[in-house]
Amino acid sequence: MKVTVSRKAHFNAAHRLYRKDWSDEKNDQIFGKCNNPNFHGHNYDMIVSVTGDIDPETGYVIDVKILKDLIKTEIEDAFDHKNLNLDVPEFQNLNPTAENIVVVIFNKLRKHLAKTLDLEVTLYETPRNFVTYSGK
């Protein structure tokens, strides 16, 4: 019997969407106001979901405290109140779109979870704009 355990989390971060190898005109055309050279910020919300079998001894799929601590150390501490382009090594050469951010979050968390557990991350850039990644 598979059960999904989810944890909501939050971080605030600034970013700029642009490609260094494109002209200013092309960056403006593709990314619009998100290409602001002075950056812009979002209040990101995310839902981290772990799916697996219930452990017959503990009754848990995963201890939510472990999941909470993992999200804090791997994501919130690394991203919160940061400029993703300048302060987060994963985005030094990766455009910090919502799509790329959710994949980075997934990869940072995935390596700490048992292989028997499935992971899915949903990242809300705004209340109406969100992306989901499950490693596929």
Image (cartoon, rainbow, N blue to C red):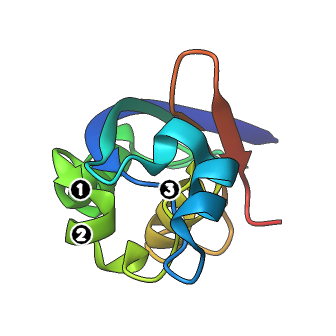
Q: Residues within 10 Å of mark 3 (few under 14, many from 20)?
A: many
Calculate the distance from the C-alpha at mark 1 to the C-alpha at mark 2. Answer: 5 Å
Calculate the distance from the C-alpha at mark 1 to the C-alpha at mark 3. Answer: 12 Å
Q: Residues within 10 Å of mark 1 (few under 14, many from 20)?
A: some
Mark number for residue 17? Answer: 3
Image location of residue 119, percent across then percent down: 64, 55
Q: Is residue 34 left or right of residue 85?
A: right
Q: Are marks 1 and 2 in contact (CB under 8 Å)?
A: yes
- Kind of residue at badge 2: Leu
Q: Is residue 12 left or right of residue 31?
A: left
Element carrying mark 2: helix
Calculate the distance from the C-alpha at mark 2 to the C-alpha at mark 3. Answer: 12 Å
Name the residue that disc number 1 marks: 83
* 130 vs 104: above or below: above
Image location of residue 6, percent across then percent down: 54, 33
> Is 86 or 118 nearer to us in this picture?
86
Q: Residue at x 31, y 60 (%)?
A: 84
